[in-house]
Amino acid sequence: MARIPDDLLYSEEHEYVRRSDEETVVVVGITDYAQGELGDVVYVDLPKVGTTYGRMDAFGTIEAVKAVSELFSPLAGTVIEVNTALDKDPALVNRDPYGEGWMIKLRIKNTGDFDQLLGSEEYKKHIGA
């Protein structure tokens, strides 16, 4: 069964948001459920630092043995860091999606947008867990 940490927020498209010590900075990645559905991740295409996205804009793609999927920004903001470790080892997304397999850090535009995300219980219902 997929791990769904209680301290994260989730999008319906299976991205997670982890708040940081800085109120307007979040870490974004895909959920354990999503990586399990994709299978073995072989490539992740992430944006450049400084790129700005609206809520639910595609920010990259993830390629697995089974499929290629778009990645969506769960919040509007500007990319301030990209996990370059995924260039050499994209399978980090499979092994540790909530840790070393994170994808981008965003400086968000509006902290009120957190209200549009799902809590862990809502996400569990969304995936039928």
Image (cartoon, rainbow, N blue to C red):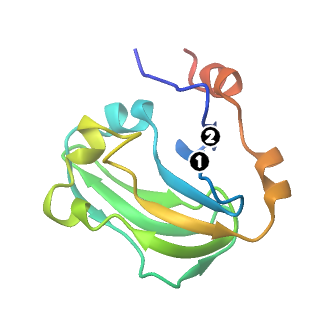
Q: Amino acid at mark 1?
A: Val
The answer to which of marks 2 and 1 sits earlier in the sequence is: 2
Is 91 in front, or is 34?
91
The circle on residue 10 is 2
**Residue beneath label 1, please?**
17
In the displayed structure, 77 sits above or below 127; it is below
Identify whether 80 is placed above or below 23. below
Q: Is residue 88 left or right of residue 60?
A: left
Q: Secondary structure at mark 2?
A: strand
Q: Are marks 2 and 1 in contact (CB under 8 Å)?
A: yes
Residue lying at 55% horizontally and 14% vertically, measured from the top left: 129
Q: Position of residue 115 (x, y in %)?
A: 83, 45
Write the residue at 16% across / 55% down: 89
Give the left or right position of residue 14, taking residue 83 as reference: right
| Residue at position x 63%, y 28% in the image | 123
Mark drawn on residue 43: none
Q: Position of residue 98 (x, y in %)?
A: 41, 39
